[in-house]
């Protein structure tokens, strides 16, 4: 009985957490998609085309890793770090805003 009550409580907490997260704006909500598009065209498309044969495949493949706005923002930061492009966090927001607008369409 205690286990059932504990599980019900945990389920309720998870439900509340999901509702709160759903109400949060994307971590890149203030990003400028058009500025992000210019960055993607300049620094991202060539690398993705070399890796996957199609610059869009990384975003459209069935097994893509990015499934939430937070993961998208983190992936953009990771690429920036790994490639040493030196973009500021605001520019990373721009890139994430463009990718969301173009490929991901996460709920706002």
Image (tube, rainbow, N blue to C red):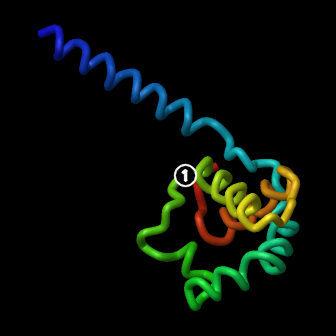
Quick check: 39 above or below 2?
below
- Residue extending farthest to the top is 2
Above or below, comparing residue 29 to residue 44 in the picture: above
Q: Judge left or right: residue 44 versus residue 89.
A: left
Image point (60%, 62%), residue name = 105
In front here: 98 or 76? 76
SS at badge 1: loop
Residue 108 percent location from the top left of the image: 64, 49
* Residue at image location 59% in from the left, 83% down from the top: 51
Image quadrant where one finds the N terminus: top left
Residue under the point 87% across and 67% down: 35
Location of mark 1 (residue): 68
Q: In this view, does 46 lie to the left or right of 72?
A: right
Q: Image check: 84 left or right of 78? A: right
Q: Is 62 placed above or below 25 here?
A: below
Q: Where residue 9 sits in the image (x, y, percent)? A: 31, 16
Q: Which of 71 and 104 is in front in this view?
A: 71
Q: Where is residue 65 in the image (x, y as percent from the top left)?
A: 49, 62
**Residue occupying image coordinates x 58% and y 56%:** 106
Q: Quadrant of residue 99?
A: bottom right
Q: In this view, does 68 lie above or below 46?
A: above
Residue 79 locus on image (x, y percent) = 70, 63
Observer-nearest residue: 25 or 96? 96
């Amino acid at each position: 009985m205690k286990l059932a009550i504990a599980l019900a409580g945990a389920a309720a907490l998870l439900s509340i957490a999901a509702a709160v997260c759903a109400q949060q704006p994307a971590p890149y909500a203030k990003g400028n998609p058009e500025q992000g598009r210019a960055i993607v065209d300049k620094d991202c498309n060539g690398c993705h085309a070399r890796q996957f044969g199609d610059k869009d495949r990384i975003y459209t493949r069935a097994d893509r890793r990015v499934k939430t706005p937070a993961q998208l923002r983190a992936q953009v930061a990771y690429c920036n770090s790994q490639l040493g492009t030196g973009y500021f966090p605001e520019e990373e927001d721009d890139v994430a805003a463009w990718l969301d607008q173009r490929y991901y369409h996460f709920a706002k």
